[in-house]
Image: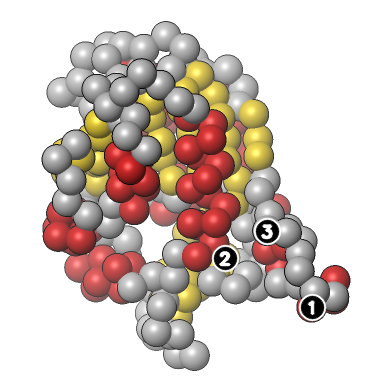
Amino acid sequence: MTAHEDPLGWETSAAADAYRGRDMRLAEQLIFPAVLERLGGGSGPRRLALDVGCGTGAVAARLVGTGQWTVQALDPSADMLGIARADRPHPRIAYRQFDGRSLDWLADGSVDAAVCCLVYCTDPDDGRLAGLTAEIRRVLRPGAPYLLADLNPAATGVAFSTLRHGEPGVVYSDGDTVATMLRLRDGSMMAGATHYRSLDRYRSFLTDAGFPSPAVDLPTLPAEGPPGEAPAECRIAPYMVLTTHA
């Protein structure tokens, strides 16, 4: 496998093109089912969900596919949104570019659910994330769920089948930049950078914005075959899913 020599910035056109070809198997097996399960059922597709940091639209497409949601899918990257509109168009998905912080076109308490997958780890700016979290809290109706899925901070350095974030044996602190490798469907690797934050820091983003402390899920795959041959994602969770409510 080969990798880009330099990490790609997440908002560049090159990153969007590479991300379009990302091997999404682990996210599809671990994040998507957990998010949909915790959102639960509802009364029909008029309910509004936000997909915050939608990238190329994979989560938004899953949400509308349940028949339970209309989705506003938001991202700072015009290139990511262009791919999402081309690859995953849907009459109940409205793709919109935003600044990563403000949801000022939405009224207080006007949203029925919010999902944010693999976004906080890509942003180095704690202030921007704090502002975004507060905005999500503002626009959610009382009791509405907020699902935040991200890299598991306890899994740095672990070589999973489709990704690795961090170097083996290195201890990271909040705010550290972490070299990250993502497998593409063609077998090559995309080099990027994420930003380490502890579970306590994620909790603080939520509680400082007025959310209750979240429930934490660490999904793994079932092991098949001899224990010593099971892939890493059967032993440790690559991702975490935090669930809280407005």
Give how far apart the Cα atoms at labels 1 and 2 are.
21 Å
Q: Are marks 2 and 3 in contact (CB under 8 Å)?
A: no
Check disc 3 and report the residue beneath it.
Answer: 221
Check disc 1 and report the residue beneath it.
Answer: 229
User: What amino acid is found at the position of numbered circle 2 in the picture?
Assistant: His
Residue 35 in view (yes/no): yes
Q: Nearer the viewer, residue 204 or 144?
A: 144
Give how far apart the Cα atoms at labels 2 and 3 are.
18 Å
Give how far apart the Cα atoms at labels 3 and 1 are.
13 Å
Check disc 2 and report the residue beneath it.
Answer: 165
Q: Are marks 3 and 1 in contact (CB under 8 Å)?
A: no
On screen, residue 131 versus residue 23, left or right, reads left
- Mark 2 burial class by Cα count in 10 Å: few <14, some 14-19, many 20+: many
Query: Which residue is at 20% across, 61% downward?
Result: 87
Above or below for 31 versus 46: below
- Mark 3 burial class by Cα count in 10 Å: few <14, some 14-19, many 20+: some
Query: Which residue is at 54% across, 24% downward?
Result: 244
Where residue 100 appears, as percent x and y from the top left, is 28, 40
**Nearer-N-terminus badge (1/2):** 2
